[in-house]
Image: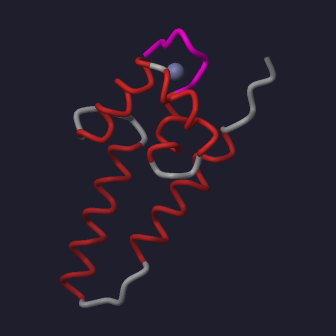
Amino acid sequence: MNRACAVRDEQLVAFAGGADFDLDEHVATCDQCQDFLAELWDGGLDHDLVEPVVQMIRLELFLMDAAKLGGGIVADMLQALITYLDPGLGKDDQ
Ligand SMILES: [Zn+2]
């Protein structure tokens, strides 16, 4: 997906996950970014990174329920996702 603005999908995914608040101001005024976030939050976006992670989290939830494990695993996975996405942020040398 090509947006007129320079914001990348990865940044919006991180923003949606609460990891990139720098985009607050931009997203508030950018229709294209809002459209992307709307699709993302609606679950209608077939994102190559989010999709497998969401499935892993669902599996984790299933395993937690099945094994009666304590909490924290899903939170750890979300943190891992944010950490995974973060290195790509702010690397634009434009
Ligand atoms: Zn934008």
Residue beneath the point at 27% across and 81% down: 64
Dominant SS type (magenta): loop
Q: Is residue 25 above or below residue 85?
A: above
Residue 73 covered by magenta stretch: no
Q: Is residue 93 above or below residue 41?
A: above
Image quarter hosting the C terminus: top right
Give the camera-side residue of 71 and 36: 36
Give the camera-side residue of 65 and 13: 13
Which quarter of the picture shows residue 70? bottom left
Number of numbered discs visible in the structure rendering: 0
Residue beneath the point at 48% across and 29% down: 28
Residue beneath the point at 59% across and 45% down: 20
Give x and y (percent) for residue 30: 48, 20
37 relative position to 25: left or right = left
Give x and y (percent) for residue 12: 49, 35
Give x and y (percent) for residue 62: 21, 73
Which quarter of the picture shows residue 45? top left
Give x and y (percent) for residue 75: 44, 71
Give the residues in magenta.
1-8
Give the camera-side residue of 70 and 23: 23
